Image (tube, grey):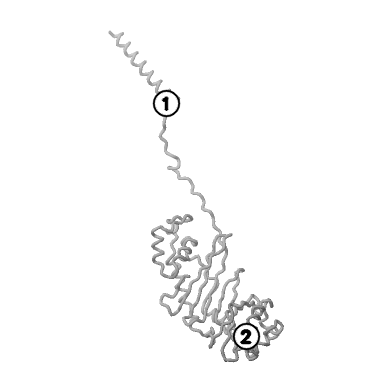
Amino acid sequence: MQVKTRHKWFIFWGVLASLIAVSVGVFFFTDVAEIRIPFEKIIPPKEKDRKKVTYNKVKNLTISQQVIQTELQKVSEELATLNEELAGTPVHSLLTLSDLTSKWPKKFALADEKEWQPVLRELSLVGQSSTSQIHSMTLVDYRLYMNANNEPETELGVNLNMITADDSYQILPLSLRKTSEPSSLHLTVKQSLVEQDHLFKPITPQDEFLEIGDGLNQINQLCQEYSDPMVFKEAGGDKFNPNYPDFKSLVARFTYGNQATYEDLFQKSRGNLTRLVYTGVDLTNEPDGTAIFELTLPLEKGEANKIYSFKYNRLDTESVKLD
């Protein structure tokens, strides 16, 4: 009885050992599906370094009422000198290049005399009458801006006023661009002769509409209020979706001019309008005292910068408008 029991235990332990051996063999030598916790879940992969963007360098133009009044004072004095030299000169005596250059004050010598040719063509239309004469030169547009070399430059919109035999005025709109040399001017005919019975009101350093400080403040506030880099990122960043709800809401709130231009500016500035740099201001002699501010958005190297214009009207309650 005892032998039989012992025999049964031998059988039991033998079967058990066999089962264990088989299990171990399966574990080591058979392809078994495994449960794996990805390493990345424990330690996240290092984020790819963002591409470092290098933007074109754009120099900021100092724009203030004081700067503009100082510059206009110089321009007004120069034009007064021109008027003293040219007033009363018969137009028919200025129809050749040699005549015109001999009468033109040497202090304001042109950079290239070939630029006189379009002027001569226009003067010939007036000079056929022996009584037509130069009356004056009137400053009607003043522009201060940064040129391609990031240097400040001035462009003047000047009317050459001529009076005819019947006391009407023939007006030739000219553009005088001052180069880095104060005595050198580039001249361009802006448009053909205009006939009218009165002269345009000139721009002077005393004009009230030169008070542009409020316009500058409005533009600065607008750029801050309508900037939102987070919305740009959420809307897809480089793969920007203009139908993203928060962006559409921003556009709907924008009441300062052209909404399509704002959309373009928002995308190109990556939602940060404060990257705009002042690079120009243009003043006209219109009754409402219009000032056009030119702001440049520096883009990546290799791309042409984008220029945006803001109009400011001192008599309008919503004066700043993005063109």
For marks 1 and 2, give the one nearer the viewer.
2
User: Which mark is drawn over residue 18?
Assistant: none
Q: Is residue 44 above or below residue 227?
A: above
Q: Which residue is mark 1?
A: 27
Q: Residue 171, percent across and down?
A: 58, 84
Q: Are marks 1 and 2 in contact (CB under 8 Å)?
A: no
- Disc 2 residue type (three-letter): Val
Q: Residue at x 49, y 47 (%)?
A: 46
Q: Is residue 82 left or right of residue 311?
A: right
Residue 44 horizontal/vertical position (percent): 45, 45
In the image shown, does 131 or 87 lie closer to the viewer? 131
Q: Earlier in the sequence, mark 1 or mark 2?
A: 1
Q: Nearer the viewer, residue 152 or 262?
A: 262
Q: Quick check: 286 above or below 293?
A: below
Q: Is residue 49 above or below residue 213?
A: above
Q: CA distance from mark 1 to mark 2?
A: 108 Å
Secondary element at image label 1:
helix
Mark 2 sits on what residue?
126
Q: Considering depth in this image, is 230 or 304 the residue closer to the camera?
A: 304
